[in-house]
Image (cartoon, helix red, strand yellow):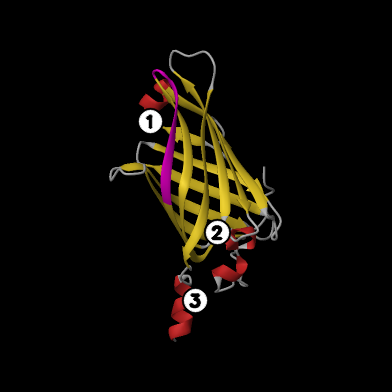
Amino acid sequence: MTDVLPDIFTEPDDVAPDTLANLGPLRRLAGVWEGAKGLDVNPKAAGPERSNFIERIELQPIDAQANGPQLFYGLRYHAHILKPGEAITFHDQVGYWLWEPATGLILQTLAIPRGQVALASGHATPDATRFKVSARRGETENGIASTAFLEQAFRTLSYDIEVTFNPDGTWSYFEDTVLLVQGRAEPFHHEDSNTLTKVAEPAPNPLKQALAMA
């Protein structure tokens, strides 16, 4: 658990207006990215199904956010995923990547339109080329919440994602979501992976844009 300071109300007065310059390891995620070689391994009635997917993810800087003295810089993201040759959405996800410079804390919030949200956390140095965040069912700091149906039929026990920045400027991720599927004794590892290539630079955060226009 994070130590709580005696003064929980006073916000920092040295907040930087330029989010992109204060994102630590998350700076290299900022922008619009595409990847056409994604792989999804998910549970089906007949056994594991392996599916290729095409992904587009946009990560844009937000203004700094404070919880009293705790200060985050972050990126708002939207990931949209299709199967090759199909128009219907295969997966859609929104959330935030957050960086706390004072502690090296990284947070990922995520929400998917099937009635599930999660908060995952980890730590890294500002110049890290790899980091990992995790969430566990039943925890309040780094937890997972699901609909009653998902809790019964496809209970999520844990979620881990590892991000790796590659020398060629791309980045890759590997997700391992452990599910307890109704009627099966052994947990199932629902895995997703992809490598993303930048197709557009990020826009400045709103405060940075406003100051540039002033």
Residue 57 sits in quarter? bottom left
> Which residue is tagged 2?
29
User: What is the span of residues highlighted in magenta in the rendered image?
Assistant: 45-55
Q: Which mark is residue 78?
A: none
Q: Quadrant of the C terminus?
A: bottom left
Regarding residue 67, the answer to whether it shows in the image is: no
Q: Amino acid at mark 1?
A: Thr
Which is closer to the viewer, label 3 or label 2?
Answer: 2
Farthest residue toward the left? 87
Q: CA distance from mark 1 to mark 2?
A: 30 Å
Q: Which mark is residue 147?
A: 1
Q: Amino acid at mark 2?
A: Leu
Residue 56 image position (x, y, % from top left): 42, 53
> Which residue is tagged 3?
208
At 57% across and 54% down in the image, what residue appears?
171
Q: CA distance from mark 3 to mark 2?
A: 18 Å
Q: How packed is label 3: few (under 14 Cα within 10 Å), some, or many (20 or more)? A: some
Q: Is residue 15 left or right of residue 144?
A: right
Q: Is residue 108 above or below residue 150?
A: below
